[in-house]
Image (cartoon, rainbow, N blue to C red):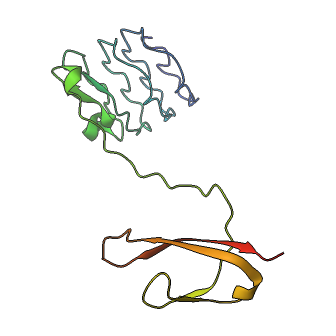
Amino acid sequence: MNSMFSGAFAFNQDIGGWAVDSVTSMNSMFGYASAFNQDIGDWAVDSVTSMSYMFGFASTFDKDLGWCVDDDVSLSYAFYITPCASTSCGVTQVDDVENCPTPSPTAEPTKATSKRSAVAFERKTAINDMTVANSDKYEWFQVRAADIDGDGTDDMVAVETKKVG
């Protein structure tokens, strides 16, 4: 893949799904590809032995690749004149890829998978000591609470209801 997109000044296509696991050299692959700024962090680069000038002069590329490669992989000027040059764009070199650092987990927001009816309530001192507004319109309601912030008090998690009729 040497120089594949080198000098392709307008190239900025999504190629993150490419299978590159057999590639051994990515020298100057995106050299001077000044518009390229796509996420290719999922590429399996285990077979690559040279990435010299891979993003050299790719002046907009600033992705954190999250790659971990052997210290015998050539990274000479791989990120030269890129916004992420100071961090090697997230590429780490280790003496043995078995020693690659484990990435920190990232918190993902959870999406609600079901709809809940909101019930206005007034918290008194305990879960079973609350007042529900318009309770005559509901066959039942259930409050789920837990101490999620660790301050010793229950925090509201969910209210489930079933309307009468």
Residue in the foreground of this view, choosing between 31 and 106:
106
- Side of 36 relative to 99 (left or right): right
Residue at image position (76%, 83%) is: 137
Residue at 66% x, 90% y is 133
Viewer-closest of 161 and 114: 161
**Of 153 and 128, the residue lying toward us:** 128
Q: Residue 4: x percent and y percent? A: 49, 14
Q: Is residue 105 above or below residue 149?
A: above
Q: Give the answer, above or below, for where 92 lies relative to 105.
A: above
Identified at 63% across, 85% down, the residue is 120
User: Is 2 in front, or is 65?
Assistant: 65
Residue 124 in percent (x, y) is at 47, 91
Residue shown at the point (67%, 58%) measured from the top left: 114
Residue 131 point in image, percent of width and height? 58, 90
Q: Quadrant of residue 46?
A: top left
- The answer to whether residue 50 is above or below residue 88 is above
Residue found at the very far left of the displayed protein? 95
Along the horizontal axis of the image, is 18 left or right of 41?
right
Image coords of residue 5 (percent x, y): 50, 19
92 to the left or right of 111: left
In the rendered view of the protein, which quadrant contains the C terminus? bottom right
Looking at the image, can residue 155 be seen?
A: yes
